[in-house]
Image (cartoon, helix red, strand yellow):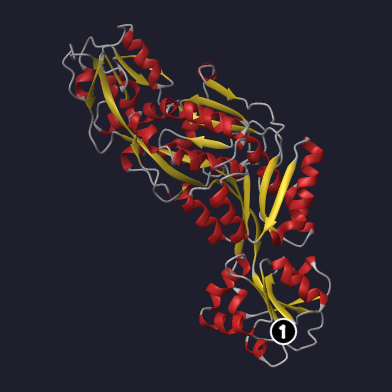
Amino acid sequence: MLKKLVIVLCLGAAAAAAWVAFKPAKTSSVPLTVFCAAGIKKPVEEIATAYQKETATEVRLQYGGTGTLLSQLKITKQGDLFIAADDGALADAKKLGVTREEFPLVNQQPVLAVAKGNPKHIDSLASLKNPGIKLALANPEAASISRVTKKLLGPEWEALAAKAAVMKPTVTEIAADLSLGAVDAAIVWDSTVPQFKGLEIVPLPELAKHTEHATASVLSSSQQPSEALRFARYLTAPEKGGAIFQKHGFKAVPGDKWAARPDLIIYSGGVNRTAIEKLLQQFATREGITLTTVFNGCGILCASMKTMQDSSNPKFPDVYYACDVCFVPPVAEQFPEAILLTEAEIVIAVPKGNPKGIHTLADLARPGLHVGICNAEQSTIGYLTRSMLKSMNLWESVSKNASSQVPTADFLVNQMRTGSLDAAVVYGININNDKAHFDAIPLPADKSKAVQPFAVRHDSPNQQMGRRLLTFLREQRTTFENAGFVWKGDTAPVKSADIVLPDWLKQK
């Protein structure tokens, strides 16, 4: 039924769509300060040079061990970006409140490196303890590589640390010692080895299964977050920073397609507008992007997506925030996973004091009443209302009194304000801020809850940005609750293909 429903596109009703675009402020000329883990110095330095040439924005880089840099940030509370070499350091930074948005850059693993050809025949952790073997380690208090290795090896670490010929602050320093022949072996990142001549990797089972992520995060102290976010996007863009990381032998994590001013397109059901419109503006301003939002009935939104043929259309939305899960299956191919963000109650809205004495859905069938319901082909609430009435054998009788069938519930509220309707089936949120003029009549609890799923298109060129928007919205629980929503945003993602509708919603 839903497939037939979304194919019906009312072109006239589409004109009712609300388009909202937010544009960013101008680029700042103030230099960016980036604190960068020493192990990824070479590619980041090259990326920063390319970015400066392309955008005329100066990037000032400060290098060091991840632990050392984090200690500096705790004290100085200055700078724009922090590039950590491991997940643990990033988690520590988040606990301290010094970072915000995150951009995974590369995957890397701890490995044992030796001179090319392995002249000392080092093939295990045990062989590192042999007489005459000089081992170099980084200081675990300063560098991520040894912090991670220490955790993986447990008690074995202490024996290695006691045997180490040298222990230095950064992974690049011990790799340089190995390259120069000053030591025989060193535990480094796999991405470190290609950056130095004459080195090769000896696989160690104790380390082989562990992967860490080097991640760039915007600092809470940044006075120019839009520019910091723009450089972070450049760092991760496959055709920009990603290509340079790959060139240097790193396993780059794909980011969004590069655009100095990307346009994020959002399709949203009308009920969500009261909560998210200002939040979207805040997000767009901080990100320094153009954000285009289409608010309309979900039937119209789904039908619009269907007419675009496929998601290669540049106008296809990056994000879809539906009014209820029943309007996710029609576009599940493009949006295979969703977060159930909020819940909204469906009620009968009547003028203050309920002059017509309406108490149930059956009362809406009384002769002479002027009732407002939303169009079932165009909107979620219309579809839910029709299904609810059909399940109670009331559809035919109530629809005869339906003097208005519109795409979104806010149209019905406006008509009630003019006195042209005696009652309307709307979301409680639609009248939440106008309790002086309206009363809400509750409906059967098992059929009057609409759950709003938020989904990012799986092949969007702005997929990471869409996920950052989701993260931002999940931090705004109070705003949603103040608008009248019930919060559900802490739940795990659901697969769109696994959404099962109750039988009463499957009626034709």
Choose top left, top right, bottom left or bottom right for residue 24: top right
Farthest left residue in view: 357
| The C terminus, quarter of image | top left
* Rendered location of residue 297, percent (x, y): 46, 26
* Rendered location of residue 485, percent (x, y): 34, 33
Which residue is rendered at x = 56% and y = 80% of the image?
A: 157
Horizontal placement of 224 versus 437: left or right?
Answer: right
Where 141 falls versus 505 (above or below)? below
Which residue is rendered at x = 25% and y = 14% of the image?
A: 436
| The N terminus, quarter of image | top left
Residue that badge 1 annotates: 134
Where 179 falls versus 228 (above or below)? below
Where 163 falls versus 411 (above or below)? below
Horizontal placement of 484 versus 217: left or right?
Answer: left
Choose top left, top right, bottom left or bottom right for residue 428: top left
Q: Which amino acid does label 1 sit on?
A: Lys
Which residue is rendered at x = 67% and y = 47% of the image?
A: 34
Question: Is residue 239 in sight in this rendering?
Answer: no
